[in-house]
Image (spheres, rainbow, N blue to C red):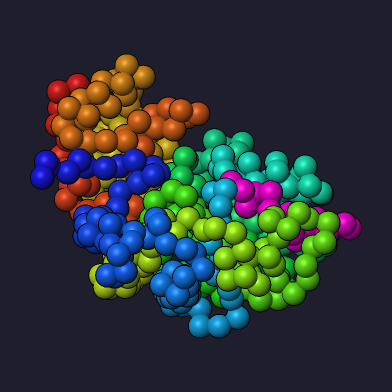
Amino acid sequence: MSKRAYNFNPGPAALPLEVLQKAQETFVDYNGIGMSLTEISHRSKEYEALNRETQELMLELLGLSSGYQVLFLGGGASMQFSMIPLNFLKPGKVGSYLVTGSFSEKAYQDAKIVGEAVIAASNKETSWRSLPKAGDIRIDPNSAYVHMTTNNTIEGSQWSDIPETGNIPLIGDMTSGILSRPIDAHKFAMIYAGAQKNLGPAGVTVAVIRDDLLQEEPKHVPVMLRYTTHAKNQSLYNTPPVHSIYVVNLMLKWVKENGGVEAMEKQNVAKTKLLYDVIDASGGFYTGNIAPDSRSIMNVTFRLPSEELEKAFVKESEKNNFVGLAGHRSVGGIRASAYNAVPYEACAALAEFMVDFQKRNG
C-alpha cells in the first residue's frame, strides 16, 4: 500500500484508515448476505437494523437519551438552510441568526426568502475575527428559533460557549465541529451536520431534532421537505444513501472505541496547538486569521506575507505529501482542517514543514 497523504481537506475530509478498511472488507459482501450494501433494499431487515443502530449511536455520543429523533437527510447541510425556515418560521414570527461566517450568512439569506429573518449578532464588520460575546447578542422575543453555526469552517472560528436562548429553540449547524468536543446537546432543539467532515463521506446529512419541534406538520411545505415526513418514516420515506450511512455508523463506533468525544477533544486541542504555536512564534511570518479566544480546533486558518509566498507554500506542501492546505477560494490564504480523523502525526509533520518553510523564506 502506498504511503497515505497528510489529508487536511476541509470536506470531503480524512477518514480513519481502520474505518476505510472495514468499509472495504464489507463492500462486496455485507455480513455474509451475498450482497453489497449498495445493492440491498433499504426495506430489508439488515438495513433497518443498521439504520436503527446508527441513530442510537448518534444520540449516545451526543449525550441524549430520549426526546430527540435522528434523521438521515439528503441535500447536504445547505439544504437545511431552507428546510429550517420552511418548517419552523411561521407567519408573524422571525428567525434570529447569529451571523459569524459564510455559511451562517447563507443560512440567514435563505431564511429571508422564506419569511422574516433578523441578525441577532454578527462579527462581519471585523472580518469575522472574533466571535460575538454574550452581551452582543440581541434575540428578538418574537423569534421562532435562533440559528447558529458552532464552528466556522471557512473562517476558522469556533464558539466556546453556547448562548442561552431561554424558551426560544436553538438550532445549531455543527457540520465541521460535531463530536469534536463535548457540548451540552440539551441546549439545542435541533442539531444538524453534513457528514463529510467529522461523520463520514458526503451524501448524507444528520439532523437531530427535539420531539416538540415535530408535533406540527407544516402542510404548506412539500412532503419531502418536511422534517415530520422523515421522522414518521425513520428516514426511510425515500431511498437513503445506504453506504454513506453505513460509514457514518463505522465512524461513530470508531469515536466510541477511541475514548468518546472527550478523548476526541483532548487530541484535537493537542493537534491544533502544534500549528497555533508555530503561527504565534513566527514573528508575523504566519498571521492567524482569528483572534486567539475564538480559534477553532477543527480549521486552522492563517496568512503569509504575500500571495506569492502562499502559492509557493501550497505548491511545496503538495510535494511533501500534504493535501488540501489552500484556503477557501472566497478568502484565500492557508487552511489546515484537522478533523477527528486527522492523526496527531499529520499535524506534527505540518508544524515541522511550516517552521522549515519560514527558515527558507522568512
Q: Between residue 129 and residue 64, name the one nearer to us.
A: 64
| Residue 164 percent coordinates (x, y) | 63, 68
Q: Residue at x 20, y 40 (%)?
A: 5
Q: Residue at x 25, y 23 (%)?
A: 315
Quadrant that contains the N terminus = top left
Task: Reply above or below: 207 against 65.
Answer: above
| Residue 307 percent coordinates (x, y) | 36, 19
Location of residue 233 (image quadrant): bottom right
Q: Residue at x 79, y 47 (%)?
A: 114
Q: Which residues are magenta?
A: 78-94
Q: Is residue 348 visible?
A: yes
Location of residue 261 (image quadrant): bottom left
Q: Is residue 216 left or right of residue 342?
A: right
Quadrant that contains the C terminus = top left
Is residue 110 shown in magenta? no
Q: Is residue 132 left or right of residue 176?
A: right
Task: Reply above or below: 126 against 315.
Answer: below
Q: Between residue 50 and residue 19, name the one nearer to us.
A: 50
Is residue 91 shown in magenta? yes
| Residue 223 percent coordinates (x, y) | 73, 58
Q: Is residue 176 visible?
A: no
Q: Residue furthest front?
A: 34
